Image (cartoon, rainbow, N blue to C red):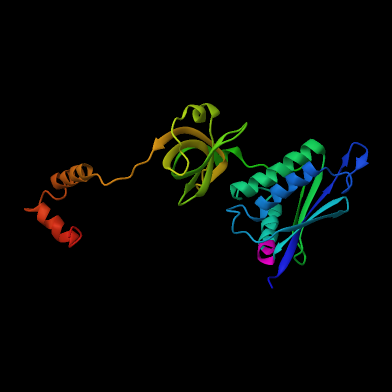
Amino acid sequence: MEKTGYIEIRITGSHGNIPLSPETYDIREIKEVLEKTENLLYPGEKKERPLISYKIEEGSVRHIFKTSLQYIIGFNALIGSINQSQTIDFLDAPTARAIEEFQDTAVKKNYTFTLSTSVLNSNEIIIDRTTHFQRTELVWADAEFYFYGKVTNAGGKEKANIHIYTEDQGIIRVETPISFLETYDDNMLYKTFGIRAKGKQHTETGEIDKSTLQFLEMVEYQPKYDDRYLTSLRNKAKKNWLGALKNPDGWLRELRGGYDA
C-alpha cells in the first residue's frame, strides 16, 4: 500500500467578534482552500494525480489534506525554500498564484495562514497581513503565443473560453470574447486550429502563466506538403552554397538516398 502523509493549513482569525472554528467557517471559504491546495500540491495536469482526502478540525480551523508521501516530502521542501527566501518568484505559475491568493485573503480578512506538513521537523510558512508573498512584476512580461491543436470546448455563460488540446502544453484555456463565439459560423469543436493569444511569460524560465491567456485571433490550420515552397527554398540554396557544384540536383538526390522511391 502506498505511503501517505498530509499537509496542514491552519487558519486563525475571526468574523467580527466571532473566532474562527469549523462551525463558523463558511463552505465557500472551504471551497477556496480546496482549490488552492490542489494547485499547491499538483500545479500541472490534474488527471494523473493521486487521491487527496480531506478533513477539517478544530484549532482555530485546521485543513488536513492527506495524499502520497512523495508529494508531501516535495511540498515540505518547497515551503522550506519559500520561508528561507521570502519570495515566490521561483515557483511555477499555478503554485505562485495559490500562494498569492492566500496572501490576498490574509490581507482582506486579517487571517493568518500557517502551512506545514506531517514530515518530521516540518518546514512551515506563515502568511498574514504583514507578509508580502507576491510575484515580482518584472519577472512576468507581456507576450504573444500561438497554440495549435484540437478545440475540445468553447463557450461559457459569463466568462467565455476556448479549450484547445495541444501536444506540448496539454489543454490550454484561452479567455475569448463572447462576441467572437456568437459570430463564428462553423462548428469548431474537435477541429484543429491555431489560436493567437496574449498573456504573461516568465522572463527567465519561459514559463507561460496559463491563467492570463486572452484570445487575439483564430488561425485556420491546414498543414500540407507544399512542393512549390520547397522548390523555392531549394533554388535559393542552389544560388548560394550549392553554386559551386556542377550538378546540384544530382547531389541532392544522392544525399537523400531512396527517400523519393
The magenta stretch spans residue 72: yes
Q: Residue furthest bottom?
A: 1
How many numbered badges does the structure rendering display? 0
Comparing 200 with 140, the one in front is: 200
**Above or below: residue 222 compared with residue 256:** above
Q: Would you say 95 lies left or right of 28 here?
A: left
Please provide the residue range marked out in magenta.
69-73
Q: Residue at x 14, y 47 (%)?
A: 238
**Above or below: residue 213 compared with residue 66:** above
Comparing 186 with 106, the one in front is: 186
Q: Residue at x 37, y 41 (%)?
A: 221
Q: Residue at x 29, y 45 (%)?
A: 224
Residue 61, horizontal then vertical, whole percent: 85, 50
Q: Would you say 118 lies left or right of 23 here?
A: left
Q: Quadrant of the C terminus?
A: bottom left
Is residue 132 visible to the viewer in this orientation of the structure? no
Residue 45, horizontal then vertical, whole percent: 58, 53
Residue 35, horizontal then vertical, whole percent: 70, 47
Q: Main secondary structure of the magenta part?
A: helix
Q: Residue furthest right?
A: 17
Is residue 82 visible to the viewer in this orientation of the structure? yes
Q: Would you say 261 lies left or right of 142 here?
A: left
Q: Residue at x 24, y 44 (%)?
A: 226
Comparing 200 with 49, the one in front is: 49
Q: Quadrant of the N terminus?
A: bottom right
The magenta stretch spans residue 190: no
Identify the image quadrant of residue 8: bottom right
Q: Would you say 57 lies left or right of 71 here?
A: right
Residue 204, horizontal then vertical, whole percent: 51, 47
